[in-house]
Amino acid sequence: MKLLSGPLSMFGAKAEIAALEKGIDANREFVPFSLATLYQPRHPDVLRINPKEQVPVLIDGDLEIFDSTQIFEYFEHIQPTPPLWPEEPKQRARARLLELKSDEVFFPNVVNLFPHNQTPERQAETEASLVAIPAYYGDMEKLLGVQEYLAGSYSYADIAFYMAQFFASFIGHPIPASNAKLIDWRERVGARPAVGQVVGTMRRFLTDNGIQTDGF
């Protein structure tokens, strides 16, 4: 099994953490990437498999799939233990929605604040995202009022939001100190060996490229 990712791929990191948490032997392969040219030229397998031309891509024999959530689902079927979706149907639905919201509601606001998106033409998007990010942190703080993880037990929802907030942090929008429960959650998730291994590799890439990761 081969997992095509990138050294600074939030979605690829999600899939790699999931494989490690489940003990799945997926050989991670970084496609060519640099801060100057990003993913150009595209890896031929990524071009062939994913119409969106993005990582992660998973190749398992004659199976070729893309999208971190689809990879999550495949991992859950081939290796049910330890479970990373809650077993109770309503709680599982909540976890799946949280994972979706992290990817498609929270993270697009983070992308809006990436340096290359800071242009006068995008000022409205920037201002909206500066409001949306702390508001989302506040919503997650409320979820953690009575439980250790976002959907009760540790799940893909935690993996997704941990990586999304990591990217928000290194562009200067970390979890505020006022969100104490969310900060405690970040420490719990970050202490997991699978998360630490993947994030450690990402930190080294950032440091090697002159981006400091102290404090998050």
Image: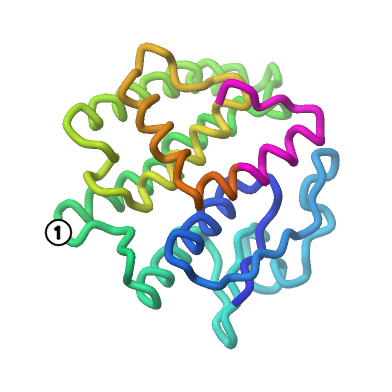
Q: Which residue is mark 1?
A: 88
Q: Nearer the viewer, residue 24 or 141?
A: 24
The quadrant in which residue 26 appears is bottom right
Which quarter of the rendering shows the N terminus? bottom right
Residue at 62%, 67% (x, y): give it.
3
What range is drawn magenta here?
200-216
- The amino acid type of the residue labelled 1 equals Glu
* Residue 119 image point, x, y percent: 71, 21
Left or right of 18: which side holds 140?
left
* Residue 110 image point, x, y percent: 54, 30
Q: Residue furthest top?
A: 178
* Residue 159 image point, x, y percent: 43, 47
* Residue 123 image point, x, y percent: 61, 17
Q: Secondary structure at mark 1?
A: loop
Residue 203 among magenta residues? yes
Residue at 17%, 31% (x, y): give it.
146
Residue at 37%, 48% (x, y): give it.
99
